[in-house]
Image: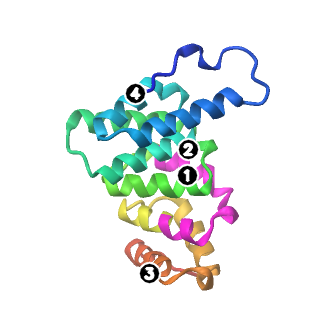
Amino acid sequence: HILEVPRQAFGGPDPYGERQRTTTGKLNSSIAEASDTASILRVAQGALPYLNAVNFSTLLTRVAKLGVTTDPAQRSDLQEICGAAVGRATEFKPRAFANTVSALARLRLYHHELLHALGSAVATKIDDFNPRDLATSLWALASLQAHDLKLVEKLSTKAASRSRSLNTQDLSSALWALATLRSDPV
């Protein structure tokens, strides 16, 4: 079943943001329940103005788990969704950032504007990254060959300072990313 959010969904006062939380949860449920990429993209297109950072992250992660789509119309829809996410970049927290860039890497979808907007937005939140999100983010950025992001340097510095906190898999991912990006781990 596909959720379509009416344009009036956020009309009127809502001092506690209850409607937004409810709509966000319903959107994520609809995304999670969709059985294929086309269904997920229909949910996204019907609710694009209402998607927040968590919705974008969930949506892209779910599409990536279903596999890389080569359908030109779906790739175009994904580009449009990424373009819409640019306007919500400041909402992204480290976990949503890590999941989003990981999904983009698995989809082989390099969206320059989104990556830079997200990088700028989370650069000030670098201390909030846990070891897994650091490693995932570095792996994804390296997979996307995002050499030009200033965020890579900040993430690699933070990962190096937390290297004792990384488990074997995360350490391996971070080291592979740094070698791929040819970044000095400090």
Magenta-span inclusion, residue 131? yes
Determine the image quadrant of residue 19: top right
Image: magenta residue range = 114-136
Residue pictured at 60% horizontal, 67% vertical: 154
Residue placed at 70% from the left, 30% from the top?
Answer: 18
Secondary element type, mark 1: helix
Q: Main secondary structure of the magenta part?
A: helix
Label 1 to label 2: alpha-carbon separation: 6 Å
> Which residue, given by chain and number where applicable, does mark 4 sit on?
2
| Label located before the other in sequence (1 or 2) | 2
> Would you say the residues marked 2 and 3 are in contact, meaning their CB atoms lie under 8 Å apart?
no
The residue identified by callout 1 is: 96
Q: Amino acid at mark 4?
A: Ile
Residue type at mark 3: give it. Ser
Looking at the rendered image, the quarter that the N terminus falls into is top left
User: In the depicted view, which residue is nearer to us: 156 or 148?
Assistant: 156
Residue 118 magenta-drawn? Answer: yes
| Mark 1 and mark 3: Cα distance apart in space | 22 Å
Q: Residues within 10 Å of mark 3 (few under 14, many from 20)?
A: some
Residue under numbered circle 3:
172
